[in-house]
Image: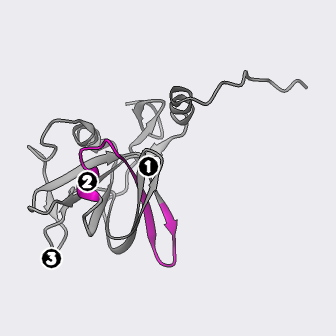
Amino acid sequence: MTIPTHEALPVDGDTFRQAMSRLAAPLTVVTTRDATGTPRGFTASSTTAASLEPPLVVVGISHTSSCHDVLSQAPEFVVNVLGPQHRAVAERFARSGVDRFAGQDVTHWPGSDLPCLPGAHATLRCVVRERIPVGDHDLLIGELVGVLTGESTEPLLWYDRAFRTLAAAL
């Protein structure tokens, strides 16, 4: 049996980005409010569980994100876990230079003014436990203080630079 070999490529930004595009990632929209009360949010493909006890999640946010400064000061945020029905929402919250909340159906976390997306598979309210600068991103460590669950359908994934479901490309 012959083991296939691959040419080793130098690890520059483009090569790394291409390699990481082969890692399927769940899509979320992370939301909060800025100091003036304006809702802010962005699409994240780097959200993961970090700990069960206490319950912690990690969200990566680029230093160049329009939400970076807000999230580096916000005391809490919400992670909205997306399904295929949220593709347009994911696209909107990934765009720069637009009011991401314009025309969106948005609710609030019960008893707060934190924006949430209705119909999310899960909605996680997090208090910022730590912010860790790592390269060109910051990692936000959020401790869950509340969870809302919605109907579970297929997840909306980001794979090979395209929206995907478990079954096929959208």
Q: Quadrant of the C terminus?
A: top left
**In this view, the mark in front (2 or 3):** 2
Q: Which mark is on residue 16?
A: none
Report the quarter where the N terminus lies. top right
Q: Amino acid at mark 2?
A: Asp
Of badges 2 and 1, nearer the viewer stands 2
Q: Which residue is mark 1?
A: 46
How many angstroms separate mark 3 from mark 1 (CA)? 28 Å
Q: Is residue 39 visible?
A: yes
Q: Which mark is residue 111?
A: 3
Residue highlighted by disc 2: 69
CA gap between label 2 and label 3 equals 25 Å
Q: Earlier in the sequence, mark 3 or mark 1?
A: 1
Q: Is residue 139 above or below residue 88?
A: below
> Type of residue at label 1?
Ser
For the point 23% across and 36% down, which residue is it?
Answer: 95
Asked if labels 1 and 2 touch by Cβ distance under 8 angstroms, the answer is no
In the image, residue 54 lies in the stretch drawn in magenta: yes
Q: Earlier in the sequence, mark 2 or mark 3?
A: 2
Amino acid on which the number 3 mark rests in the picture: Gly
Residue at (25, 64) in percent of width and height: 74
| Front disc: 3 or 1 | 1
